[in-house]
Amino acid sequence: DAKTTQPPSMDCAEGRAANLPCNHSTISGNEYVYWYRQIHSQGPQYIIHGLKNNETNEMASLIITEDRKSSTLILPHATLRDTAVYYCIVREQARGAYSGAGSYQLTFGKGTKLSVIP
Amino acid sequence: DGGITQSPKYLFRKEGQNVTLSCEQNLNHDAMYWYRQDPGQGLRLIYYSQIVNDFQKGDIAEGYSVSREKKESFPLTVTSAQKNPTAFYLCASTPTPGTTYEQYFGPGTRLTVT
């Protein structure tokens, strides 16, 4: 799997857009970019994922560069409840029901600790 | 509301005792997973199950056991053979085995063994 690099921490003022970068320069053509977040002492929460087109849902937008070597997660109007550790993960889509344990494991790096400030 | 529930949120046990962590989902998901998270670390896969009555070992299955007798339930037993059981345990599920990494997580159980 391609490795990802994220800044260890970021601050964002409440109400402003939070832009979280992720570098994945070794990404291969069939690997997707996934974003999860984990609020302290809670389970991780899926946010969004994409292959090469920009994606938007009710939580966030994902902007993937044309060469796919980096991406940015955008929280358009950050609130205090968005304070969390954000993880960028690059993985292939699993190929069928019995692909082995490696197909299912979510490997989280250290992520970016986002602090939303009042 | 649909979701994954884990109970209890905090669990304390004496060394040498087995303990079972509950995981229930009403999302009608086929696949379920157990992860362990240690402070400041990522997730490590303990066991996973793609369908009822079937489960597979993950990277750190030693000292753990699971069962999958019902689609909605995937309990994890931490046995006395697990050398460092104190950790945050997370259960997750996905709608169809092997098709997506869009995993849905429960709130977790923090186990402390003394």
Image: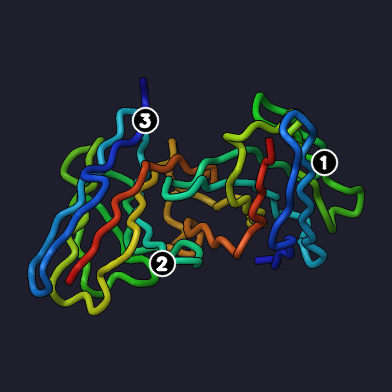
Q: Which residue is mark 1?
A: A63
Query: Do pointers 2 and 1 mark residues of a single chain?
Result: no
Q: Nearer the viewer, mark 2 or mark 1?
A: 2
Q: Which residue lies at the image location 21% right of the left edge and 75% below the top edge? A: B82
| Position of A109 relative to A112 (above/below) | below
Quadrant housing the N terminus of chain B: top left
How many neighbours does mark 3 have within 10 angstroms: few (below 14), some (14-19), or many (20 or more)? some
The amino acid beneath tag 3 is Gly
The amino acid beneath tag 2 is Asp
Residue A48 or residue B15, whichever sits in front:
B15
Q: Quadrant of residue A22?
A: bottom right
Q: Quadrant of residue A62?
A: top right
Image coordinates for residue A40, horizontal then vertical, percent: 48, 49
Q: Secondary structure at mark 2?
A: loop
Query: Do pointers 2 and 3 mark residues of a single chain?
Result: yes
Chain letter of disc 2 in the image = B
Label 2, label 1: how far apart the Cα atoms are: 31 Å
- State if disc 1 and disc 3 touch (CB < 8 Å): no
Q: Which residue lies at the image location 37% right of the left edge and 35% below the top edge? A: B29
Chain letter of disc 3 in the image = B
Sequence-first disc among 2 and 3: 3
Residue B101 or residue A107, whichever sits in front:
A107
Label 2, label 3: how far apart the Cα atoms are: 24 Å
The amino acid beneath tag 1 is Ile
- Image side of residue B92 versus residue B114, left or right: right
Number of numbered tags placed on the structure image:
3
Q: Which residue is mark 2?
A: B38
Q: Nearer the viewer, mark 2 or mark 3?
A: 2
